Image (tube, rainbow, N blue to C red):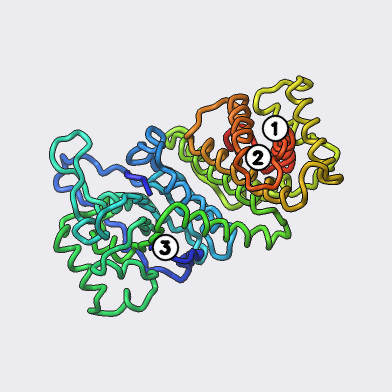
Amino acid sequence: MAKKKPTTTATAPTPVTATPVAAPATVVPVTTSPSAPPTPPKHPYRDLAPLEEGGPIARKGFAYQDHVAAGKCLDMLLTDGPSEVWCEAEDDIVLVWVIQSVEWFEFVQVKSNELDQLWSLAKLCEKEAAKDGKGPGSCIIEKSLAHDRGVGNCRFRIVTCREPHSDIAALKLALNHSTRTEKDGDFDKLVAAVEAKLGGCKSDNGNGVGFWVRMTVWEHKASISDIECENLVKLDGILHRESIFLAPDQKKELYVKLTQKVFEASLARAKTDKESKRIKATDLRPWLLQQATYMARPVSAGRSDVLEGKLNDAGYQPGTDEIETAKEQRRNYRIELLQPRFLDVTDRAMVEMEVQARLCRLKSQLDDGEFTDTGIQFHARCLKELEAMQDHLPTQKKPLVGLMYGLMYDIMNRCQHRLVRASV
């Protein structure tokens, strides 16, 4: 499963909630002779072992998929969203929908391939190399259709960073769109074209590729930055509805925690720890609100409790010189805010903006795995970076390094910076 990564205004996708096309009845194979082995019983999708478990083994570079999954998690807390999001379980992502009191399992293939062409019918039907290197493997359609093997209703979704070609663009339409249901229309021609290429392919439930075409929706997400912007809009809407107000940096930090939650769910073993791979709306909402409330909690200007906790998390023991120095530098910065001596208001605003931006970049690099620093090492990296900034800031007076350090510690005390990777 490959997972990598024209710019459009990001809008929250509208999940399909109207009654979808009913899946054909499960086909039970008939034994051809008394000596034929019995057909193994089918199991509900919740109880199936995955067809493969490559995700936990090779998660590096799956950021695009994680952001897609994070968006689906946020959809759970919006109107008409799914009830569960499974990460690297039966498929790249599995969405569980409850439609008219009936569960539907949507198997999502995420393709971040930076192709030099649009996705086409030929590309969808192109056989990939077999894992053992012996002969051709399966195409994307065959791999996706193979998930139609359990007891229950299923449908499919493809998410790509490249647009689909006009020959398959109809797949972007909702399942209940009139173009899909029109008799002998263009959609029927698409079904026929796929069947002509892969007509002999059947799922374990006896459904062919025509079933896959009719039950698949294509979703285009151009880049990680587009998905992230779209997801932050969703998060803002959720927080506004809950009357929780966070600064932009705090919202970004909360979103980073959500993507980390998705990442950790993806790493869990599907065969031995199914529940850890399944993020549920009933669990996600209290977790998200708890994290947001903690970030929004006002901190007394004279207290450095949060700062001290973050330094402890980085590996500094309570009461050490490093912690006491950090608290003192933060206090000096707070005094400068009340009684300016070294920076006028304009210069201070410039310094704050640049320091926050630089710290945000460093933190993103840490979360992305570009740095493998311990907390203490990353703390030293941040201090060194601030010192290097001192001579290049467009201020009337060069800011004191001590004040820049104090600013960083004040930002940490407001839960807008940390010295270790994001955790849930």
Q: How far, Cα to Cα, is label 2 from label 3?
A: 30 Å
According to the image, label 1 marks what residue? 310
- As drawn, the label of residue 417 is 2
Residue shown at the point (80%, 47%) measured from the top left: 298
Which type of secondary structure does the marked residue at label 2 adopt? loop
Residue shown at the point (84%, 40%) measured from the top left: 335
The answer to whether 256 is drawn above or below residue 177 in the figure is above
Q: Quadrant of residue 256?
A: top right
- The reply, left or right, for residue 250 in relation to residue 329 is left
Residue 93: x percent and y percent?
Answer: 42, 49
Q: How far, Cα to Cα, is label 2 from label 1?
A: 9 Å
Task: Kindly report which numbered mark, 1 or 3, lies closer to the viewer in this rendering.
Answer: 3
The answer to whether 190 is drawn above or below residue 58 in the figure is below
- As drawn, the label of residue 7 is 3
What amino acid does circle 1 point to? Lys
Nearest the eye: 297 or 320: 320
Crowd rating for badge 3 (residues with CA inside 10 Å; few <14, some 14–19, many 20+): few
CB within 8 Å, label 2 to label 3: no
